[in-house]
Image (cartoon, rainbow, N blue to C red):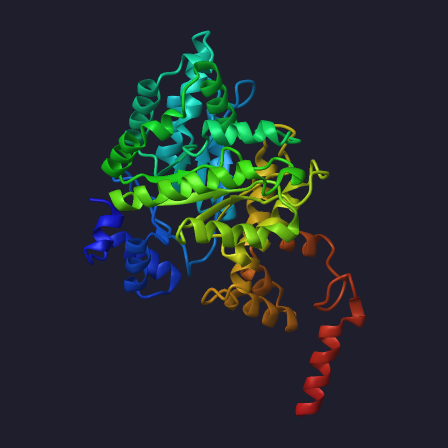
Amino acid sequence: MTQSIFAREGTITPEMRVVAEKENLDPEIIRDGVAQGRIVIPKNVGRNFSVEGIGAGLKTKVNANIGTSGVQGALDIELSKLDVAVRAGAHSVMDLSTGRDLMTTRRAILHHSPVMVGAVPLYAVAADLVDAGQSIEAMTASLLLESIEAQCAEGLDYITVHCGVTREAVARTHAQDRVAGIVSRGGALLAAWMERNNRENPLLEEFDRLLDIAFRFDVTLSLGDGLRPGAVSDATDSAQIQELLVIGELGRRARARGVQVMIEGPGHMPLNQIAGNVMLQKRICDGAPFYVLGPLTTDIAPGYDHITAAIGGAVAAAAGADFLCYVTPAEHLCLPDMDDVHQGVISTLIAAHSGDIAKGVPGAMDRDRALSVCRKELDWDGMFAAALDQDLPRRRWEENRASEGKTCTMCGKLCAMDAHNSLRRGCSS
């Protein structure tokens, strides 16, 4: 049975207990959240790892995308990126490979990953067709569903499926003359397939079969935003909303079947629209966990999009988003390298934690208070131990260490902390 079915029957599973311990919550709270579809625990029945919960009342989680492209990338490099992401604190990785030998890459990532693993099964189908000299229009519904089943059988914990990319919603992108059009790879591939075959989205038409597959392996469905805005000018348009309405209904069908489900969201979006979009998603999708990319709050920062995404991610998390997909400095430019992955994870963790403080997640402030106490006492080792990234601040401090005393080179003998500590000692004597 799935986590959802166990939860509805009143059973607290071992996975629910692990999540409860990590979140410092009563296991009954986790069970109730899973039963209502407000919390998901992505874990394939065929994998064993330390699970995480995603959803209402829990700490905001962070995903890191890795994987080869058709022009760059090798398995050993992607496995190294996996290690970098996990060491930096990522709760999840997604294998978005589109290069050759995808099965070997996916299986290796699943074997090596100590965290949950997601993927977009459509990518493997499209890549195999390209390798065979064919285009996406040659895909059949059976070919797609058979590939999804095979990939779930390998152990994927959650899959992104763009079931809400309908012919009607795609037509809206044309009618509105979107600036960036369709920027989701999966969304664009499905739109091309529908246009060339004069058919509706096979993931929508075969949704019941998709649910059967997900139920068998307890794979969480991440209902993808294939029509997410890829430019701030396109945010919150009718195509995006039309897709959201469709996947909101599909989310209800999935929960009724006992399948765990989360909803994906934008994208590129002005700062003042983010909270409203989170509220809209929660309302339309009955409080299902919300998984967002960014959102990126401006389009003019290539090379620094990990910063624009962290700004938007903090606002989204504070407003109720549950799962943030990282964006690296390489976004829109190239395949990320090791340093990009590290920076992407850390910047997104900062956004997630900032959101958790704002929405009052239990214990969110504890680490901040611990670091601040150490900072006040000029306890550098304690400060570094409490930091998200321990290596960088320690290295910068040691490379620029003051020649005497415990202060840093910013203030030296005029350190406010040191002066106030001396004042306190004088007052207490």
* In-image side of 387 versus 48 (left or right): right
**Location of the C terminus (image quadrant):** bottom right
226 above or below 374? Answer: above
Residue for point 25% across, 38% down: 215
Residue occupying image coordinates x 36% and y 43%? 251
Measured from the top left, where is residue 323 in percent x and y? 47, 48
Left-right relation of 154 to 310: left
- Tell me the residue at 41%/22% (across/down): 124
Q: Give residue 26's position: percent from left, percent from top.
A: 31, 66
Give residue 226's position: percent from left, percent from top. 49, 33
Residue 426 location (% of width, % of height): 71, 88
Looking at the image, residue 217 sits to the left or right of residue 96; the answer is left
Q: Can I make out residue 392 in this image?
A: no
Which residue is more in the foreground, 348 or 29?
29
Residue, far bottom: 429
Q: Answer whether residue 173 is visible to the viewer in this image.
A: yes
Where the N terminus falls, by quadrant? top left
Residue 2: which quarter of the image? top left
Residue 147 picture quarter: top left
Circle count: 0
Position above or below: 399 against 246: below
Looking at this view, is 68 or 404 the one in front?
Answer: 68
Find residue 10 and report its image quarter.
Answer: bottom left
Q: Determine the residue positioned at 28% across, 63% down.
A: 28
